Amino acid sequence: MSSSANNEDLSYDVVVVGGGPGGLIAALTARHLGASVLLIEQNFDVGGRGVLSGGGAYLGGGTSLQRAEGIEDSPERLFQDWVRADSLLGRYNDREVVWAYANNSAATFEFMTEVGNVKWRPLGAADRLDTVKRRAFSLEWEEPAGQVVPGQFGSGIVRPLEKAARELGVHILLKHRMVSLHRDRDAQGAKGRVSKLAIVEVDDYFTPTGEVISVKARQGVILATGGHSGNVGFRRMFDPRLTEEYQYTGQNWAPKTADGEVAAMAVGASIWGFAGQTNESDGQLSKGLMGTRSNYHGLLWSVDSPHFFREKATGLKPSDYQNLVLVRESGVRFYDETAGVRDYDYFAAAMSWSGDPEKLNGGGPIWAIFDAEAVEREGWNVTPPNVDTDGFFFSADTIEELAGQIQMEYQWRPMPPGNLRATIERYNRCVDEGVDPDHQKPTPRFKIQRPPFYAAWHTPVVHDSYAGLRINGSAQVIDTEEAPIPGLFATGDCASGFTQHGLGRAFTFGYIAARAAVSTGQARTGSGPTSNKDGV
């Protein structure tokens, strides 16, 4: 099918915005129920962040896979697990949302298995709030054009769903981005249903290139746009420290620019679940990779990926933080480098004020400093495309020269050479003495002394979006007057009320949203689904 659209009114029963996990299952479900469906995706391929993932989804409540492994589960138990008051993951959840998830989780799993043809590995160990095994992982899928991310299994879910959706007749429109939603008003000006949306064609860097196109949605619009982590102004509503220097997971593949949230808010939608975003309970921040701008630790990009032209570097993954020190833009250490990914005091220290007189929020860049001996111990290749030398990786023969080279858009001043020299000299004395009196790094082991010396970008990276559009148990978007917005639904990271990591909530509410959109749309029109004209 063509990935472009004619500049005329297109009309479908259901329009899904976003081709990630939630959008794919929503499109497949709606089409399976007989609706005509258009799926809009801004990238040149579907999959969203799901294709970059490990392919794991919390789906339980009594699935066939659970029964086959002798695991007893129920919707009631699933609900109780995910609203536990003794956990930061559970206490802030919207119980109506979790109840809907619990009662539809097993049905979602069976639909993905039977209609989506997803194949599953044995269940993994119970983790996070699950008290029994629920998290299912897909089998690996061989990407025909080379894996996007080596060793990840997310393609084992999204590719079968895509194949099933195409075979069933879902129209997929690539390289188009939603601009706005339209909500009807009656003669007295009262707000009505969301009946259409505006989209525009974009290039490989998501920049609009064509004219705005209008698309009608007779039964519903389902937003599956992937959250807000890449929209600096939006994410700072939840944490003012998250200024522009913080990159986010999969940013060059699946930009999470809050398109769904912003468009829905413009027609009256409410934002929800702020505490779920701000309680730092489940790794919304990560230490990440080094030397690359898209630096989430779980994404080691393949240079053979058709996407790599945007990525530019694979990055370096430290195996032992004894091999480096971490400094702020001042050239001064700030915390024990061996801190784990759940040590939120580390992130607090990294994001404390940098001293920038014009920018009081945000912590500024964090740099990993190491030497040639560390490169040998780690077995790193410190040349492109392993590192991004366009502002995210530097090398020099002296510490002072290294500090002087560190200049990029997020560095408000050159790193003071004297500060970095003093930091390294003091750290080397700590190695001699076997004690770190400044930050209690356990028995510092390796001096930084043999040139060349290196500085690699190692600034915390933003991960999940847990706050977003308020939805109810039918995945309907709720407005600021606490009423559903007719014809508008949401799933995945752009929806809120449920601090669950992974794909399970996106799949479940994509399934719920599609069923609700089709049923309410049919009730509104008093007829069954209608066929779309062949406009794409």
Image (tube, rainbow, N blue to C red):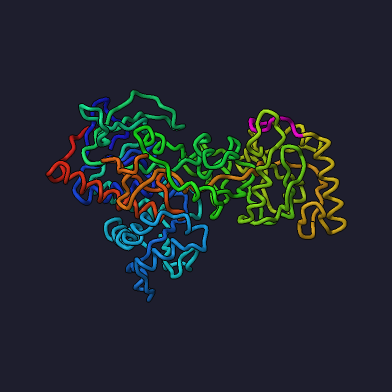
On the rendered image, what quadrant is the N terminus found in? top left
Image coordinates for residue 510, horizontal then vertical, percent:
33, 50
Q: Nearer the viewer, residue 412 or 446?
A: 412
Please identify the residue farthest to the bottom as the structure is shown: 70
Locate residue 517 relative to residue 176 in the image: left or right: left
Q: Nearer the viewer, residue 36 or 336?
A: 336
Q: Quadrant of residue 74?
A: bottom left
Above or below, 2 against 320 in this view is above
Q: State the residue at coordinates (84%, 42%).
A: 422
Image coordinates for residue 136, horizontal then vertical, percent:
41, 63
Q: Quadrant of residue 402?
A: top right
Q: Nearer the viewer, residue 399 or 382?
A: 399
Image coordinates for residue 488, horizontal then vertical, percent:
30, 41
Residue interval drawn in magenta? 408-415
Q: State the residue at coordinates (21%, 30%).
A: 186
Image coordinates for residue 433, horizontal then vertical, percent:
87, 57
Q: Quadrant of residue 83?
A: bottom left
Locate residue 184 relative to residue 427 in the image: left or right: left
What is the magenta segment's predominant secondary structure? loop
On the rendered image, what quadrant is the C terminus found in? top left
Whether residue 502 is visible to the viewer of this picture, yes or no, is: no
Q: State the residue at coordinates (44%, 43%).
A: 227
Above or below, 10 against 307 in this view is above
Q: Nearer the viewer, residue 504 or 385?
A: 504
Whether residue 334 is visible to the viewer of this picture, yes or no, is: yes
Q: State the residue at coordinates (40%, 48%).
A: 492
